[in-house]
Image: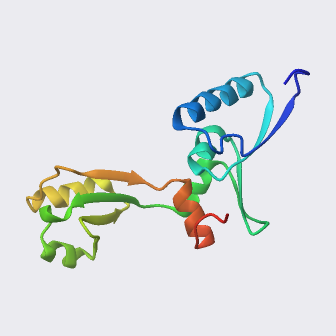
Amino acid sequence: MINDPQIIFLDEPTTGLDPHARRNFWQLIKNIKAQNKTVVLTTHYMDEAEQLCDDIVIMDLGRIIEAGTPHELLAKHFEDVFIYLPQAQVSSELVNEHGWNQLADRIEITSKNVEKTLSLLMSNNVSLDGLHVKSANLDDLFLKLTGHSLQA
């Protein structure tokens, strides 16, 4: 950084940092990017890649398996969002009728249309207390593309 480089290579720079230090480092990277400098970052932290990277390359066992912007890749591989509700709030008949997943303590619903799904739940008098809606993230993408968790 002393020579004011135009390209900066960072290999796993936040490994071992606590969450606060990681966020501070992320801000440093954002400040460097704001100076129109190129940052090449390797990371196993998908949330970090999603926050910092304009373009990503996903590799598995030394091979590039996908490349693009985080938004493009997520849109390409995921149409649905995940809706979670406490299991006690949804009748087993409704779960079976719609083929929803029954997890240990909650019901998982995949949906292309959140509003329609929520309307269906409300029309069946399902309480929305504890509702959680989650879009796919880069962790989900990595697992989908590789079929396994991150390698050591």
Which of the 4 image quadrants contains residue 57? bottom right
Frontmost residue, 95 versus 151: 151
Q: How is the image coloured?
A: rainbow
Residue 4 on image: x %, y %? 88, 21
Which of the 4 image quadrants contains residue 51? top right
Furthest residue toward left: 125
Residue 85 on image: x %, y %? 23, 58
Residue 145 on image: x %, y %? 61, 68
Query: Residue placed at 19% from the left, 78% from the top?
Result: 97
User: How many labels were placed on the picture?
Assistant: 0
Query: Residue placed at 59% from the left, 35% from the top?
Result: 22
Q: Quadrant of the N terminus?
A: top right
| Position of residue 86 in the picture relative to residue 144 (left or right) | left
| Position of residue 74 in the picture relative to residue 90 (left or right) | right
Query: Residue placed at 20% from the left, 79% from the top?
Result: 96
Judge whether 28 appears above or below 122 on screen: above
